[in-house]
Every structure is written in structure tokens, then in C-alpha cells.
């Protein structure tokens, strides 16, 4: 964990205007292009959804992966079941979309250079990985619990038994502010990147 001088630049976005699943994807793709964002992490009523933006638009784990042997069905990105999602990249920032009282809200956060932040690299669960280079996803599973999720990241080393050489980590920035008494607190956090490195 490291501390750097940085300032969170938080902007409240225009209210999301989508009405259905197609509109949701279009809105996310427009925001990703506007802010140069690469990854998606969403939480829905039926599970966790990972995604990646490329020249062809948004691809999610639910679009491209299905394990016939284990009947692994990743959750689908649907406006009816979505609770919140974050689209993010290291250089672009993060757009956070969430449901509040039946209405959608969103805001965008980007790094600036004048206040404090703490960087954390959270280990994602999964002791083994099966890479799908064609779609750019890796199906992670936990050897002891059988839990599975598919991350949009393949720069991962595995041994002959598909065990991860290093765990996959989610990079998070926590921004620090101070009250009038000089007491520090975390005022905001954003997702940044996926990596297997403990530190740069």
C-alpha cells in the first residue's frame, strides 16, 4: 500500500437516459469512449459481471463464457437486475452508476495531482485460471470452494495444473481528505486497474 499526492476530481454526470438493456449498453459504451475507460465491474441481483470495452464495444463475461461441464452461467448485464456498476481505467478514471430509489445516478472520478491518495491492491478470489485468449477473459475458480468468476484480463501466469502463479489483483485508489481539526479520512474510492503485480 502506497501514499501519493493526488486530488480526486468528482463530477456528477447527466442522469442516465437508458430505458432497456440495449439502451444500458449503449450508454455505457458512450461513457467508456468519452472518458477512455477499459473495464466494467457490475453487481446484479443474480451475480457479478465483468466486462471489457474494445473497438467492437462492450463484451461481458455473460456474453462470451459458458462452461458446459460445470454449467457455469455468468450473470447477464440487464437493466432490470443491475444494482450498480463501475467502468474504469488507470488513466481515464472511473464512472460509477447506481440505482437510488428507483432512479439511476452516476458520477465520474478522475485523478488530479494535489491531494493524498492511498493505493490498495485487493486480491481477487480464485486460485486457478483458465484463459480464453479469443475473448480476452480468464475464468478464475477457487480450488477449495469451487467459486467462479471471469475477469477481462489474460496477462496471468498459470502452471501445468492451471494454478495461478500470482493472484489477480484489483487496484483501488482511496482519496484522503482532512476535516477542520486536521483529522484524515477516506472521502472517496475508485477502481483503477487489474494486475498480478504486488506493486509497480
Image (spheres, grey):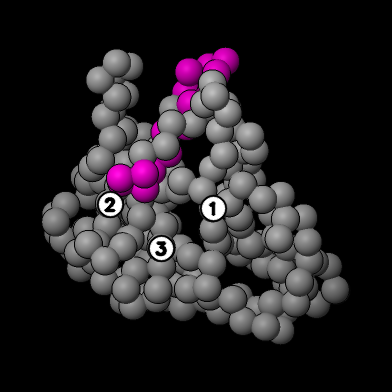
Residue at x 52% of width, y 73% of height: 91
Left-right relation of 77 to 155: left
**Is residue 48 highlighted in magenta?**
no
State the SS at label 3: loop
Q: Which residue is mark 3?
A: 38
Helix, strand or loop at mark 1: strand
Rounded to the nearest whole Å, what is the CA distance between mark 1 and mark 3?
10 Å
Question: Which residue is tagged 1?
Answer: 194
Pick the quarter of the image with the C terminus: bottom right
Q: What secondary structure is found at the residue carrying circle 2?
A: strand
Asked if residue 144 is among those painted magenta in the image, a careful observer would answer: yes
Q: Earlier in the sequence, mark 1 or mark 2?
A: 2
Left or right: residue 89 compared with residue 185:
left
Name the image quarter holding residue 125. top right
Look at 20% across and 68% down and name the residue there.
Answer: 17
**On the picture, is 9 further left or further right than 80?**
right
Chain part drawn in magenta: 133-147
Could you say which is closer to the camera, residue 102 or residue 166? 166
Q: Counting residues from the N terminus, which is met first, the one under dot 2 or under dot 3?
A: 3
- Structural crowding at the residue carrying mark 2, measured as other residues with C-alpha within 10 Å and reported as few (<14), some (14–19) or many (≥20): many
When the figure is inspected, residue 18 is found, relative to residue 123, above or below; the finding is below
Residue 153 picture location, percent across and down: 45, 48
Picture quarter containing residue 159?
A: top right
Q: In x, y percent, where is residue 190?
A: 56, 61
Could one spot residue 126 in this view of the protein? Answer: no
In the picture, the disc for residue 59 is: 2
Residue for point 29% across, 16% down? 69
Residue found at the far front of this picture: 160
Q: Callout 3: 10 Å neighbours few (<14), some, many (20+)?
A: many
Amino acid at each position: 500500500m502506497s501514499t501519493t499526492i493526488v486530488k480526486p476530481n468528482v463530477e456528477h454526470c447527466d442522469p442516465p437516459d437508458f430505458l432497456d438493456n440495449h439502451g444500458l449498453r449503449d450508454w455505457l459504451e458512450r461513457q467508456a469512449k468519452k472518458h477512455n475507460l477499459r473495464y466494467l465491474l457490475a453487481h446484479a441481483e443474480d451475480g457479478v459481471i465483468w466486462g471489457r470495452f474494445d473497438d467492437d464495444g462492450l463484451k461481458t463475461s455473460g456474453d462470451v463464457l459458458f462452461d458446459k461441464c460445470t454449467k457455469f452461467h455468468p450473470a447477464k448485464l440487464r437493466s432490470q437486475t443491475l444494482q450498480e456498476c463501475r467502468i474504469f481505467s488507470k488513466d481515464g478514471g472511473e464512472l460509477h452508476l447506481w440505482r437510488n430509489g428507483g432512479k439511476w445516478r452516476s458520477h465520474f472520478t478522475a485523478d488530479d495531482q494535489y491531494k493524498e491518495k492511498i493505493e490498495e491492491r485487493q486480491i481477487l478470489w480464485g486460485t486457478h485460471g483458465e484463459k480464453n485468449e479469443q475473448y480476452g477473459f480468464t475464468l478464475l475458480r477457487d480450488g477449495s470452494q469451487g467459486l467462479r468468476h471471469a475477469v477481462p484480463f489474460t496477462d496471468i501466469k498459470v502452471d501445468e495444473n492451471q494454478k495461478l502463479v500470482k493472484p489477480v489483483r484489483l487496484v483501488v485508489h482511496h482519496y484522503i481528505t482532512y476535516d477542520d481539526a486536521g483529522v484524515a479520512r477516506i472521502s472517496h474510492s475508485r477502481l483503477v486497474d487489474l494486475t498480478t503485480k504486488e506493486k509497480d
